[in-house]
Structures are given as C-alpha cells and as structure tokens.
Amino acid sequence: MPPPTTAEEIVQKYLDMPHPENDRTGETRIARLAVLEELSKQPNAVRAIRDALAEAEDPKKRKELVEVCGREIQTKDSAILLIELLEDPNGEVRREAISGLRRLSSRITRRGQSRMARPADFNRKEAERVIREQMQKGGTKSGEAKTERDSHVGRTMPLEGGPDFAPKVEGLIPHLIKAVNDDEERNRILALYALADTRDPLAQLELRNRLQDSSEKVRFEAACLLCEFRDASGLAELQAALQQFQTANEDKRRDPLYYSHAQRLLFSFERITGKSMGAIPPDPNFLSDTRERPQIDERYALLLRNWATWWAWQPDVEGD
C-alpha cells in the first residue's frame, strides 16, 4: 500500500492503527503520533482532524488528535478548533485543548519547578552536584548558594520581566481565562500556567482572581505564579502553605507532590523577597541514589524553618 499523501489519508491511517489499553511502554502510542506528525506538512490538516473528531468515539483517539493539533499545527485554524474543544464533555480532551492553546499563546520558554530561564550551556547534573557539595558543607549564607551554583553552571535568569517572543497566535487570553473556570481542578491549574506564560497584565489579573478559587491547590498555584510577576497578592496563601509543609507528618512527606510543591513555595518566596536562604535541593523523588534522601529531607526542613522564622519578624512584602 502506498504511503498516505493527504491529510485525510494520514488521519485514516492513524485511526486504523492499534490503540491497546495495556500499552505500558507507550510503543504503539509513539508509532501513532509519528504518523500524526506528518500532518504538519499538510495544508488541510485541521479540517481533517475536525472531521475525524466528529466521527471518533474512542476517548484515546480524540485526545491524541487534539494533542497533535496543538503541538504540530500551530496556526490560527488550529487555535479555533482548540477553542471549540474547551466545551468538549471529556475532561481529557479539554485538557489537551488547554495544553495546545498554551503552546500557541506562550511568550516564554520556562520549565521546571524553578520556572527560570536557563542559558544554552546549562548543565543540570552539574548544578545538582554543586548543590550537594554546598549541603555537605553545612549550608551557606543568604544568597551565596545560588551565586556559587550559577558560577558553575552559567547565568540563571529570573522570570520577572517582559515576554521573550511573540505568541504563535494572538488573542487567546480571553479563552484561557474561560479555561481557568473548567470543572476539573487539574485543568484549571494547567490554564493558570498557560496564562502565566503569556506574560500579559490580564493574565496577572486573572491569577489574582483565582486566589478565591474553591480549590486549595488552585489557590496555591495561582499564588506561586503571581510571584513570577513580582506580585505578592497571594502571600497569605503561601504562608498558610508554609505552615502546612512544616507540620506535615511522615505520610504527607512521602506524597509524590510534597517536595514538588515545597520547591514551588521556596522559589516563590525568593522571587517576591529577593532573598535566598540557600540552595534549594532537587526533588528527592527523582534521585537515582536513595541514600541521599535523608540529607535532602533535612535540608528542606531547614529551609522551611528558616523562611518561617524570617516571616515571623519581617512579614510585609510589596508586589508590583
């Protein structure tokens, strides 16, 4: 059979491929997405995806079609389809639509818990090595850990400031604000990140509005993201989270998200105060050597305790 040459043929080939439920390694998914990537070369790709979505009932197929629409076909037509899918009854499909709109509207290239821009020569392993060495020395004075680390791995640029580049598609912020009101908590959180990546004042305003969200997790993420705008409006939420982290029992500290959120909190405090209590360790859940975990546990406890002490005597921070 000759290879597919039109968008419709590519989509049909994808739909005919196996979609096993027990694909633990993701090999069949990788093969399916490789086929869909060919749509980026086709002028009628969005129309072909729209037609397929109208017929497809399998949630996995619908999710992957939407995923490739946002990742590989970054056009205004793609944005229009993704906006329509914010109304889809399936939460996973809506999530992929939000993710696609995030790619199309983003004006920064920041990733990870620190949400910092890294230079091209940044070496994460080297950064973690420097942090471990500092921890073995028994801590450092305020600001020195970060300075020493950066001298080893290259300049680390804070997120504060304007955007890095123009969005792929203009005018998407009102639709991201709509997505922040999604019924599903994790979809609302993803929409918050999408808004923060636009670096727009309207996004900052909506992040402030989310401090009133019914979900504690949404409020926490909104407060952290506001710090990227040097906006301390969510300080009360962050201080409440600090208290929870300090009083967490062993079971809560074993939660996979405990240290991920603790990192977010510590980086947020650094942003709005301009201070550092020392190097922030990596998430111990991702360490290859589990013997390092007790030391990192102690380091996190020390950082959280130091911030609690600092806030106790100097609680006022002004945001922009």
Image (cartoon, grey):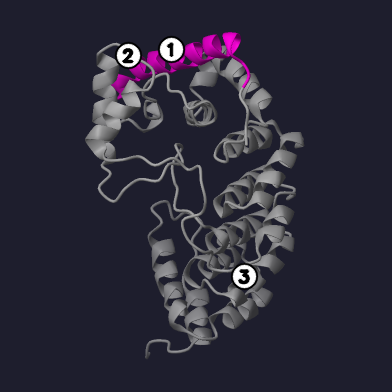
Check contact, mark 2 vs mark 3: CB within 8 A: no
The residue identified by callout 3 is 79
Q: Is residue 137 magenta?
A: no
Q: Position of residue 48 (x, y in %)?
A: 58, 82
Single out the mark in the foreground, 2 or 3.
Answer: 2
State the residue in front, 1 or 215: 215
Q: Answer yes or no: is residue 288 visible.
A: no
**Residue under label 2:** 139
Tell me what residue is drawn at x 61 percent, y 24 percent: 317
Q: Residue at x 39, y 67 (%)?
A: 31
Q: Is residue 81 visible?
A: yes
| Residue on which the image places disc 1 | 302
Q: Secondary structure at mark 3?
A: helix
Which is nearer the eye, 53 or 74?
74
Instruction: Indicate the secondary structure of the residue bearing disc 1.
Output: helix
Residue positioned 28% across, 44% down in the render: 122
Pointer 2 or 3: first along the chain: 3
- Real-space Cα separation, disc 1 to disc 3, in angstroms: 46 Å
Type of amino acid under label 2: Gly
Quarter location, residue 84: bottom right
Q: Main secondary structure of the magenta part?
A: helix
